[in-house]
Amino acid sequence: AQTVTQSQPEMSVQEAETVTLSCTYDTSESDYYLFWYKQPPSRQMILVIRQEAYKQQNATENRFSVNFQKAAKSFSLKISDSQLGDAAMYFCAYRSGVEYGNKLVFGAGTILRVKS
Amino acid sequence: NAGVTQTPKFQVLKTGQSMTLQCAQDMNHNSMYWYRQDPGMGLRLIYYSASEGTTDKGEVPNGYNVSRLNKREFSLRLESAAPSQTSVYFCASRDRNYQPQHFGDGTRLSIL
């Protein structure tokens, strides 16, 4: 079974600075997808960014980018120019590209605090 | 423009009571999922329905049942609630294989 590990329970960043959240995963599959979800205090689960394993190029979405290291099974999220609205819990998630049901496996999450 | 709608948003139960959490999506998605979120553990899959008419167990199915009533609706039932089922429950849906899951706003369930 696949597992996702987020080793940083909490992180802090100064407004306008850059922060990187870590995620590692364990799988024997070659076809899969990786996601970062943001959960603000409102409890909504908001998709931040996604990465297909077959793509070598790292995904970017405005101030959010990932460093996808397939061989190392690492998928970190970089937030540039951090804003107060970025404060939230961030979850890394894995989804098989071949397994029936395409279920998500989540890490335990990282709380990001943004200081003004 | 509702997306995934969960009802209720909050509920308090006594141990042994039964309860059905409702989930409906208006995006014509094929697959639907129920997760629970506990502190320090991320979201864990309870049950899922890959397509209308099918349901399968996830990682933590004990104490729960589900019904895929039609393509839109996927309900989660607690037959005899236990304090260990105190959690936040999320419903999600997904269209095609390469699409991400869309989540509802969650139901906070407390069992005393």
Image (cartoon, coloured by chain):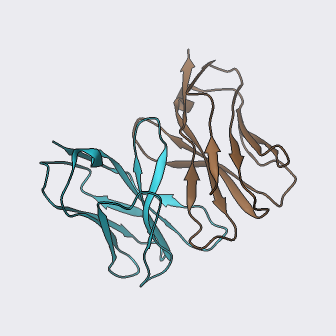
Chain colours: A brown, B cyan
Q: Is residue A68 left or right of residue A79?
A: right
- Residue A70 visible to the viewer: yes
The residue shown at (47%, 40%) is B41
Q: Residue furthest bottom?
A: B53
**From the viewer's perspective, is residue A9 above or below residue A60?**
above
Give residue B37's position: percent from left, percent from top: 41, 46
Give residue A111's position: percent from left, percent from top: 53, 29
Tally of marks: 0
Q: Nearer the viewer, residue A86 or A29?
A: A29
Q: Nearer the viewer, residue A10 or A43?
A: A10
Looking at the rendered image, the quarter that the N terminus of chain A falls into is bottom right
Q: Nearer the viewer, residue A72 or B51?
A: A72
Q: Nearer the viewer, residue B73 or B3?
A: B73
Tell me the quarter of the picture where residue B52 sits: bottom left
The residue shown at (12%, 48%) is B14
Tell me the quarter of the picture where residue A60 sits: top right
Looking at the rendered image, the quarter that the C terminus of chain A falls into is top right
- Residue B29 visible to the viewer: no
Give residue B105's position: percent from left, percent from top: 38, 51
Give residue B34's position: percent from left, percent from top: 41, 61
The residue shown at (70%, 58%) is A33
The residue shown at (59%, 67%) is A102
**From the viewer's perspective, is residue B68 above or below residue B86?**
below
Q: Is residue B26 left or right of residue A9?
A: left
